[in-house]
Image (cartoon, rainbow, N blue to C red):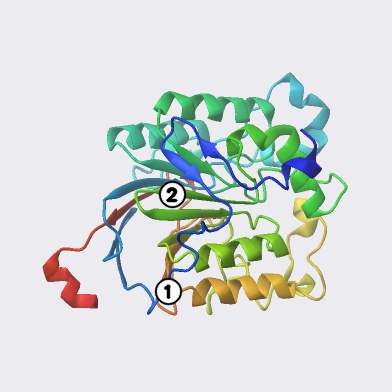
Amino acid sequence: MKRRSFFKKTTTALAGLGLTTSACASARTINQKIKQPFKVCATIDQQKVFFYADVIKESIKVVHIADTHLFMDDERGIPYQAYSNRMAKAYNQTTHFQTRIETNPAEAFEQTLAFAKEVNADVITLIGDIFSFPSEVAIEWVLSKLKDTGIPYIYIAGNHDWHYEGMEGTLESLRDTWIEKRLLPLYQGNHPLMAAYDIKGIRFLAIDNSTYQINDAQLAFFKAQVASGLPLVLLVHIPMYAPGKTISFGCGNPNWRAATDRNFKLERRPKWPESGHTQTTLNFHQEVFNAPNLLGIFAGHIHRNSIEMIKGKPQIVADDNASGGYLDINFLPMNKGDKRLIL
């Protein structure tokens, strides 16, 4: 499939999986007026997350996975070893975040999928750095394991998923190249950079910010989803900037620029721009936290749990799955007694 035609594609349906996708708001919902921001109650107990809101009509169970960093490879990867060598050794053995027993990314991933089956999850969200580099055998292995679960899933790329370290090209061109060559089956026919998935009345938005930036089409897509009036959940790999956080919270971060890029030599990639983020990326950050129908944001990238609250919008970041981390997310209707707390 030619990249020019594929990256223009924005809508499709996932036949038989119980998810539908939409790239722009439907005519029936675009004119809905949001009188006031949705009121949300979010609670966290270790990896368990509970979201309560009056707009949630049915319970939704989400198993959220980030940063598995699978490093498996085969003979097809030999020509690329000069680019994959460092990350192929980075996560060969890890320590499980709960048991403190030695584990590894493949084992941790399988255990998390087993948990998703055990709890009968409605959807598995895979939000980037599932791979340490775009290994064909690793991608095929993940696709097989996901198919075996029988559970619908959502995938967006992280900065390592498409990155062969030292390969020439801009971040955007390298992302487009390796999405088309290797990662494309994981999107199940959906647009890799932006897609919307409807699950029991909640619309999950998967937006790729794995270059730390947002493009014009993604911003327009997000604004159209906000205009729909539907309850939204945003899935991004790199967390949105929040005051007091490190540069790893790099989407919309006013300090993100060449002067703060300490890892470009290690990761053998282009240095961040001298001028920092594009205005589009900064506008996206503003639109996200001003969106009255956004219930929350879920991210990864930093390899530890974190929660931030900006303008009443909770952002929750998952621990790395390479060490067994995941989020057990529950969207639940509010009972009458609890409604008094926030309404």
On the image, the x and y values in percent for residue 121 come to 33, 40
Q: Which mark is residue 198?
A: 2
Q: Classify mark 2: helix, strand or loop.
A: strand
Front label number (1 vs 2): 1
The residue at which mark 1 appears reads as 33
How many numbered circles does the render carry? 2
- Of the 4 image quadrants, the one containing the C terminus is bottom left
Report if residue 70 is visible in the image: no
Per the image, label 1 sits on a secondary structure element best described as: loop
Whether residue 317 is situated above or below residue 136 in the rendered picture = below
Q: Quadrant of residue 37?
A: bottom left
- Determine which quarter of the picture holds residue 91: top right
Residue at 63 percent across and 67 percent down: it is 250
- Outermost residue on the right side: it is 168
Amino acid, disc 1: Lys
Which of the marked residues, 1 or 2, is nearer the chain's N terminus? 1
Q: Give the percent coordinates (x, y) of residue 161.
A: 66, 43
Residue 180 or residue 91, whichever sits in front: 180
Instruction: Name above or below for residue 201 compared with residue 242.
Output: above
Residue at point 67% right, 51% down?
Answer: 159
State whether residue 160 is above or below residue 246.
Answer: above
Q: Amino acid at mark 2?
A: Asp
Image quarter hosting the N terminus: top right
Q: Residues within 10 Å of mark 2 (few under 14, many from 20)?
A: some
Please tell me which residue is depicted at 41% across the width and 74% down the height of the picture: 34
Question: Which residue is more in the foreground, 316 or 225?
Answer: 225
- Residue 319, how many percent across, how many down? 45, 53
Classify residue 282 as left or right of residue 243: right
Cβ atoms at labels 1 and 2 below 8 Å apart? no
Residue 189, how many percent across, how many down?
A: 61, 36
Viewer-closest of 265 and 232: 232
